[in-house]
Image (cartoon, coloured by chain):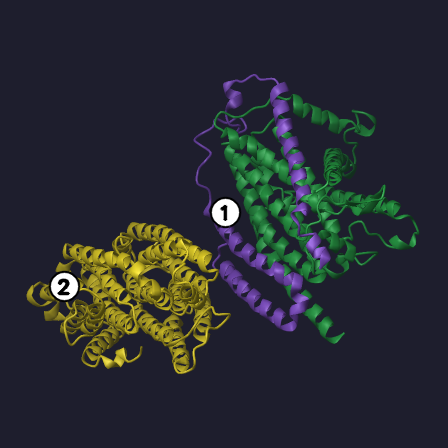
Chain colours: A green, B yellow, C purple
Amino acid sequence: MELAFIIEKFALVILIFVVTLVIAMYSTLAERKVAGFMQDRYGPDRAGPFGMLQPLCDGGKFFFKEEIIPAGAHKALFILGPTIAIITACISSAVIPWGRDLTIAGRVVPLQVADINVGILYVFGVVALGVYGIMLGGWASNNKFSLMGAVRAASQSISYEIAMGLSIIAMLMVTQTLSLREIVEQQAGFNWNIWVQPLGFLIFCTCAFAECNRVPFDLPECETELIGGYHTEYSSMKLGLYMFSEYINMFVSSAVMVTLYFGGYNFPFIDSLGLSPNLLAILGMVIFFLKIFAFIFFFMWIRWTLPRFRYDQLMNLGWKMLIPLSIANIVLTGVITIVKDTFF
Amino acid sequence: MSAIITLSLLAVLLLYLGLFKAKKALLPVSLLGLLAAIVLYSIQWDTDAEPLYSGMVLFDHFAVAFSILSLFITGLVFLLSRDYFDSISEHVAEYYALIIFSLTGALLVVSFHNLAMLFIGIEIMSVALYILVGIRKRDFSSNEAALKYFLMGAFSTGFLLFGITLIYGATGSFDLTEIKNYLIANPHSISPLFYSGILLLIIGLSFKVGAAPFHFWTPDVYEGAPILITTFMSTVVKTAAFAGFLRLFLTCFVPLQDFWAPVLLVITVLTLFIGNISALAQQSFKRMLAYSSISHAGYMLFGILSIGAASAGAIFVYSAAYSIASVVAFAVLILVKRSRGSEHFEAFNGLAAKNPYLAFTLSVAMLSLAGIPLTAGFVGKFMMFSGVLANYHIVLLLLAVLNAAMGIYYYFRVIVAMYFRPADREEVTVNANYKAVLFIGALLTIAIGIFPSLLAGWL
Amino acid sequence: MTQAEAVNTSANYLPILFQLIVAGGFGVGTIIITHLIGPKVKTENKLGSFESGIEVIGNARQPFSIKYFMVAILFVLFDIEVIFMYPWAVNFRQFGLSGLLEMFIFMALLLLGFIYVIKKRALEWD
């Protein structure tokens, strides 16, 4: 293990971390701007040009607000909750390949923090851990609304995890690997997985919405029923961390969806441009982020378009629609692949 | 293996019959399934037994004989279950399915050839039972029994699993043949892990068969569970656990007999005395049967203690005799409890005058459990004791005979109550299924008692 | 299989540890900073539970609906079955038709259990 490797990885980790935070911060602004656009109004426009400084003000305010830990709360778990939420949100991006390898001064630098051969499993494992943050925070608050929000969050995210796992299985049957890097390489040019797994993508996308607790699946924190849901009792930066982790989750799940189904950093005619490899890597990364932004916009678009589900509708959709559908998808994929392998 | 697969599918089928409100079909379908499994096993009897599925299971004569016994006893339990389950709970199909699942686990336990299968079999068997014991959801004693059984079961599984781990650590294999080869290859340099492993396995299995000092869950669980579930537990499950116990020790641990025999000896003597002395003091027939089942575990441990070529046959005959007699005893108990609402000895007063048939079959069962000649129980005890006599001290035999005498006292209390204590009572109505089971049970008990070769020739 | 070996070493997992350190440092650091610089005026009302101004009755940690528990148990069952499918999915082309049929049998059993659960109304929310 040479020093250069450690420095390189640390630099990459910090870079990605900063980018993630900035994107999460500006997603809050984007959300409000999109809401304004959809509702035919301006949205925030006071702090700086087009309200560009708004997220900074919000962030600063989180730091200077009073920190309240309710008297009846379990103090250690109350603090642990948001910490777990932010940690799991931040580390889930570790296996996403952001672009092709860069060559800097003769040294090959992969634009991926960790290329492990169980990439998808890692993402799922970490995302599944995220529910602990919500569950612990909600329980530790000692508030009925928080507890209800936490329990809803837990049972919602585990319900949709099954369908998500099943939809991924159909995709693995196509890719034959768990490594995200290899999955992206297979989608070179325009061979995106969305063309072979449209149904799988629909299921995955729905589940991703549910896992991120986004509208129409935002029952854990629906203001009209549960005050603030699991973070009712939270204030100052601990509330900020929950908010952050939600937006980071949205960013990461957009990145995962792009990686799995929309070719990651690949774009059509990538190799016929005749550019140098380093330039192509950077161009690929830009394209990758553009695709992610498109998805984040899609998240927001849905939020300001659809109403919220009722809880039984939510559970019925997860268990009685998505699970059978994804099993059907696996069967279909299996049969088609075998028929293809045998006869063509 | 086809029988085990058949049974698993049968259980799923039963669940679905319950879903589609075909309650009438449950009993015939389960009996047909059991019959099919028995036929499938019988076909296998004369084929050369080879370990199947990478050495996971082995259907030798031992496995097939014990499997058929378990299937047969389960069939008797099912015959008794007409009208019984319906009165306890609305989830009748689940009863049948869970019993079949538990039976499937039992069949794996008697035919394992790999320690992993032993563990899986015991788990399948036990997990279904945890639910069955607590299936009367609104009954406190049933709930208590289920919780106790679950906690003790989980605890003992821990011991078992740890023992298996240590043995794996010493030998590097779960396979019974490999473990035996390890012992033969290194007679003087056996890893200390192996010895601890054997001790932990003895503890874990003693929990499962309910041998003292690991018996304390048995009376409460047997009393709290619905009577038919108690019947199933004290017959099929106990038989399977003993068969698994014996199979493990017979195949693998014979060379180390000097090490584990003293430990098992202490357990055996403790089990006998605790079971019998506690049974003496009981006023409830059901609880008496629970304690007497502990003492029967003690007798069956003799078979493992005097391990050798004859012990499989001895345990087979003993468990067959014990199981059949127990089914009869519990069947009569169900009928008496239904008419008198009590499980005490007094509830049996004067039964002979009104229901001579019931009283006679129960007497036959009690005589068999006590080990009186011309019943199956005597043959079983005789085979056990002769094995002990060949291998061990006469003192041990005297202890066993003393215990048998104690057993005669408390088993005869019921007979005395039925024939010599007059009481005003109504005639107990007995439906055809019960009549058939009682007839089969009494007939087999006497037949085996007179012609022991009927069963003793199997193994 | 050089690539498979290359991605299997623990060095490949080390960067994840770096990311964990950075993320953990951020989370813990910000909480400590706000703890230090924020105002601290504690009053009884502020420290009580917030229930939209209504007086709080009883403790929040009460038993909640068994339905959530059912969902959790069913999740464990189904998720384990899903996990079994991962290694199969990655290699299923090598297994060919027989492998596919075997997995279909496995999935049919899963589906039978699923239908049973639904028919037993274990997932009804009313």
- Crowd tier of the residue under label 1, counting other residues whose Cα lies within 10 Å: few below 14, some 14–19, many 20 or above: some
Q: Which residue is mark 1?
A: C68
Whether residue B260 sits left or right of residue B191 in the image: it is left
Distance from the alpha carbon under mark 2 to that under mark 1 = 59 Å
Q: Secondary structure at mark 2?
A: helix
Q: Secondary structure at mark 1?
A: helix
Whether residue A272 sits left or right of residue B225 in the image: it is right
For the C terminus of chain B, the quadrant is bottom left
The image position of residue B153, as x and y in percent, is 36, 54
Q: Which residue is mark 2?
A: B398
Q: Chain of mark 1?
A: C
Q: Chain of mark 2?
A: B
Nearest the eye: B348 or A344: A344
The image position of residue C120, as x and y in percent, is 47, 59
Nearest the eye: A142 or B157: B157
Query: In the rendered image of this protein, does residue A99 appear above or below residue B187?
Result: above
Q: Are marks 2 and 1 on the same chain?
A: no
The image position of residue B143, as x and y in percent, is 33, 51
For the N terminus of chain B, the quadrant is bottom left
User: Residue A91 is drawn in which quadrant?
Assistant: top right
Q: Amino acid at mark 1?
A: Tyr
Q: Amino acid at mark 2?
A: Leu
Query: In the rendered image of this protein, does residue A57 appear above or below residue C69?
Result: above
User: Residue A7 is drawn in which quadrant?
Assistant: top right
Whether residue B97 sits left or right of residue A101 in the image: it is left
Pair 2/1: label in front: 2
Nearest the eye: B142 or A252: A252
Residue at (18, 80) in percent of width and height: B450
Q: Residue furthest right?
A: A274
Q: Residue A222: in sight, yes or no?
A: no
